[in-house]
């Protein structure tokens, strides 16, 4: 259990939260009540469904602020699933005269937004060349009321001066663009991050409001535009459109990957490191970028990322397996940071970085042999031949059931290698 899990269990024992919600449909909790057990900021900021404490997951609870010092807990869905972006990747570049931004090493949402603005990504997505940066930072929501959909039906609540934060606002002749930016890949996001700024500025401007969610990772920008079909309904959010952009993209050919493969020196496996069971290689790269900003504990990763405790183990162990991450004991607290090789690779140009990551994968015997089958057959093998390769490998100390489960990770990592050829298309 995380610290949040424990603290919310203690709050439930003291205030009968589950009973109150079941009986009345909601429970109002004050920040000073939460602070008896843990800092409210840490106990109430849930960017993703996976971040919710055990008490909330088991009872289908959500929590949102309704003032600077109080929150409402009810049975509603706080989150909206992020769709996969389809369509051609749009290529953009930073103007050659810009020297003050290192677009190869984006370490904050602010830098990501600056890159998206000066490269023309935002104006292209909004279809407005005259956008000017205007608002950002923390502000008060003022007063408004709205409804959200609960398991028992529609519930109405009032918000009074809740604190909100806008990562960036851009204004054009016809519209005001409000952007929420993230550096972490996730399956969903907290609707409040778009809805509260939307409701504030709906009353302050007569221009069209454009609600944008922007995700940056590994040289790519993913932009999503959402609208609220009913301005007073939190859960009426809908996706209008989404696009994917690449910045200063350098194409990777299959011959580039083949050249890496031909130069591979297979390493001796360290059997003390678990064989990977982290299926999304994009998220390993994303964690590489996040650890380049600051070391993180397991709980930091859970709170910052769209992971539960088990998944954080999977992905940190995968990074250690590849030699990208270190597990360190910092005065009795376990933290993860980048290895020497991880620090070098994360700061390489896009194409070089991807090929170095390919090298780190293929230098392991099992992945090397499976990729050899791909070269010979022209397709990533399915589980059956992979299982045979693993069984016959000197690197494997896994039983049959474990091999079957790990084979999905092998397939996904090989899929990622093959997909590099089409990334910019």
Image: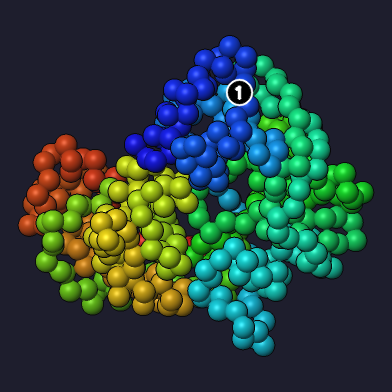
Determine the residue positioned at 55% across, 46% down: 41
Determine the residue positioned at 77% across, 37% down: 160
Asked if residue 48 can be seen in this view, the reply is no
State the residue lying farthest toward the top: 23
Determine the residue positioned at 21% across, 68% down: 363
Q: Which residue is mark 1?
A: 27
Question: Does 114 sit left or right of 382 as displayed?
Answer: right
Q: Quadrant of the C terminus?
A: bottom right
- Considering only vertical position in the picture, is 267 above or below 5? below
**Position in image of residue 129 (x %, y %):** 81, 68
**Position in image of residue 300 (x %, y %):** 41, 52
- Considering only vertical position in the picture, is 237 above or below 183? above
Colour option used: rainbow
Q: Work out whether residue 17 or residue 252 is closer to the camera in this orientation and state it.
A: 17
Determine the residue positioned at 62% across, 14% down: 24
Place residue 68 in its image quadrant.
top right
Question: Does 199 sit left or right of 332 as displayed?
Answer: right
- Considering only vertical position in the picture, is 190 above or below 316? above
**Position in image of residue 187 (x %, y %):** 51, 44
Asked if residue 127 can be seen in this view, the reply is yes
Q: Work out whether residue 29 or residue 92 is closer to the camera in this orientation and state it.
A: 29
Secondary-structure class at tag 1:
strand
Place residue 44 in its image quadrant.
top right
Question: Does 145 sit left or right of 290 as displayed?
Answer: right
Question: Does 81 sit left or right of 316 as displayed?
Answer: right
Circle 1 packing at 10 Å, graded few (<14), some (14-19), many (20+), is: many
Q: Quadrant of the N terminus?
A: top left
Q: How many numbered marks are there? A: 1
Q: Work out whether residue 290 or residue 268 is closer to the camera in this orientation and state it.
A: 290
**Position in image of residue 304 (x %, y %):** 47, 51
């Amino acid at each position: 259990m995380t610290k949040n899990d424990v603290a919310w269990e203690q709050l439930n024992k003291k205030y009968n939260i589950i009973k109150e919600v079941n009986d009345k449909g909601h429970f109002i909790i004050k920040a000073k009540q939460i602070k008896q057990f843990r800092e409210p900021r840490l106990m109430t900021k849930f960017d993703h469904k996976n971040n919710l404490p055990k008490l909330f997951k088991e009872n289908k609870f959500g929590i949102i602020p309704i003032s600077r010092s109080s929150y409402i807990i009810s049975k509603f869905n706080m989150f909206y699933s992020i769709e996969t972006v389809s369509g051609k990747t749009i290529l953009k570049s930073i103007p050659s005269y810009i020297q003050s931004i290192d677009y190869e090493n984006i370490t904050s949402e602010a830098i990501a937004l600056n890159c998206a603005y000066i490269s023309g990504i935002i104006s292209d997505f909004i279809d407005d060349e005259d956008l000017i940066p205007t608002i950002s930072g923390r502000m008060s929501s003022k007063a408004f009321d709205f409804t959200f959909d609960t398991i028992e039906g529609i519930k109405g609540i009032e918000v009074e001066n809740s604190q909100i934060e806008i990562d960036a606002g851009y204004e054009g002749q016809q519209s005001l663009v409000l952007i929420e930016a993230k550096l972490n890949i996730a399956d969903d996001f907290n609707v409040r991050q778009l809805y509260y700024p939307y409701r504030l500025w709906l009353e302050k401007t007569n221009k069209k409001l454009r609600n944008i969610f922007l995700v940056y990772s590994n040289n790519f920008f993913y932009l999503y535009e959402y609208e609220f079909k009913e301005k007073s309904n939190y859960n009426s959010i809908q996706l209008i459109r989404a696009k994917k952009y690449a910045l200063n993209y350098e194409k990777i050919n299959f011959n580039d990957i083949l050249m890496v493969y031909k130069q591979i020196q297979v390493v001796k496996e360290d059997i003390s490191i678990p064989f990977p069971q982290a299926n999304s290689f994009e998220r390993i790269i994303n964690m590489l970028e996040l650890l380049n900003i600051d070391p993180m504990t397991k709980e930091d990763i859970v709170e910052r990322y769209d992971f539960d405790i088990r998944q954080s183990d999977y992905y940190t162990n995968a990074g250690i397996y590849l030699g990208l991450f270190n597990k360190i004991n910092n005065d009795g607290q376990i933290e993860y940071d980048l290895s020497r090789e991880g620090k070098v690779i994360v700061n390489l140009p896009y194409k070089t970085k991807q090929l170095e990551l390919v090298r780190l994968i293929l230098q392991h015997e099992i992945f090397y042999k499976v990729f050899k089958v791909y070269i010979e057959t022209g397709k990533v093998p399915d589980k059956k031949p992979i299982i045979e390769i693993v069984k016959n490998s000197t690197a494997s100390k896994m039983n049959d059931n474990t091999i079957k489960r790990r084979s999905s990770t092998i397939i996904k990592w090989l899929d990622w290698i093959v997909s590099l050829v089409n990334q910019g298309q």
